[in-house]
Each structure stands twice: as structure tokens, then as C-alpha cells.
Amino acid sequence: MKMRLLLLLILLPTYLMSQETFRDKSFFLNFGTEFRITPIYRNGDQSITTNFINPDLQNSGPAINIGVDYYFTQNFSAGFKTSIRYDLITTNIDGLSSNTERGLLFGYHFNLNYHFQIFTKGDLLVDLGLSLLNRNSEYTRNETVFNEEGDVVASNTYMDNYNFSANKISLGYAKGRSRIMTGIYISRNTKYFEDKTTFIIPHISFTYRLAKL
């Protein structure tokens, strides 16, 4: 009995490791962190910013990620993850009527990932995807209407948000259950500026594979 128990203790870790090594036709639950760096704008393409928010402040800082990957083969996978950040939603700029507010901002990320097994230990990762950012950024915008004499004649209230989508490109390294990635979000279709403005958000992330589902 003792010999069987000893044998089980020896073989069980090997079995579990082999289950982690073979990824094809399997789901994996992941958890990680991400840090987004201040956006970078293409030269000559930044237009006049709209009011009530600083786009640099709202789109930089830490996030928590949780998601699932499905491996069609040993090296090719598709995934979905949710990111959660506590950040600015609105802020008062140039004395216009809007209250500073912070809250939870969510992002939804769809990606395709490929492992290139070119290292003796670990893989090179290439990740391409689409991200839906700043969900839950709804705010109330108040605008005061003046007549020609400068007197207040009306006040209008609007609901608005800073939702936008971005293409995501990442490159990284994976070993065992861990991976580290660096890359950029690329977007033009935002409400931050009066005209379409190209900007990128650099990021670096760490992900740990919690379990095979």
C-alpha cells in the first residue's frame, strides 16, 4: 500500500505536467495584469481635443485581465478576455460644466495567438486581435446656452461615453504556465477629438495559466 502511494505521488506530477504540455483541443483559464503607457499620437494627426476628459490619463495605467483560450492545435489558439481598470470617467477641463468622476472601466478583447517553438525553452508568441475599450464610461454632459449679450438662456444635458475599439498587436515569450507580452493598441475612431486622430497605446502584460478546463 505504501509503495502504491509513493508511486502515485511520483507519477501524479508527471501526469499533470503532461496534461499542461499538450494544449490542442483544450480550454485554459488565464489571469494576469497589464500596464498601459501614455498614448502616442501620429505627427500632424492630432486634432483639437473635446472637453470633459484627458485622453492620456484615461487610457494609461494598470488593468487586471481574466480570460479563456481555446487551442485548435498545439500552437494555434483563439481567446477572449475581460480587462478591469479603476480610472477617470470624466473630469472638468477649461472650467466647463462636468464633474470629475472615477469608476470601473471594462475592456473586451478577442484575439488569435500562435506559438513559434524556436527556443530551447519556451515559445515566441504572436498575438493579433480586436479590443472594445472603455466600456462603462457613460457620463452626463451639461452645456450652457448663451444669447448674443452673453446671458444664460438655457442649459442642455446629454448622456455620452468614451467607448472605442482598437486593433491590438502583441509579441511575447511563454514558458510553462507564464507568458509576458508587449505590444500596442491602434485606434482612430474615438470621441476624444473633433476629427479622426490616429493614436497608439503601448502596453506590457503578464499572464498566468490558472487551469485546464
Image (spheres, grey):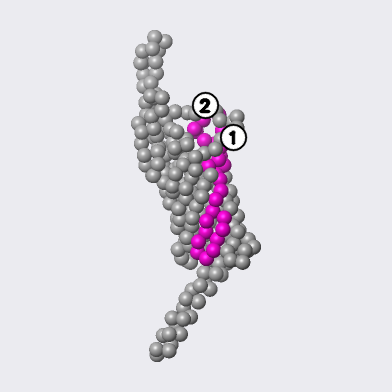
Asked if the stretch drawn in magenta spans residue 105, the answer is no
Q: Nearer the viewer, residue 146 or 46?
A: 46
- Choose between 193 and 161: the one closer to the eye: 193
Q: Quadrant of the N terminus?
A: bottom left
User: Count of labels shown?
Assistant: 2
At 39% from the left and 89% from the top, the residue drawn is 2
| Span highlighted in magenta in the image | 172-201
Q: Mark 1 near mark 2, Cβ–Cβ under 8 Å?
A: no
Amino acid type, callout 2: Ile
Q: Which residue is mark 2?
A: 48
Report the residue marked by disc 1: 42
Report helix, strand or loop for mark 2: loop
Residue 173 picture location, percent across and down? 56, 58
Residue 85: x and y in percent read 41, 46
**For this rendering, which residue is in front, 136 or 179?**
179
> Image point 50% across, 52% down: which residue?
205
Residue shown at 62% from the left, 63% from the top: 119
Check if residue 189 falls in the magenta segment: yes
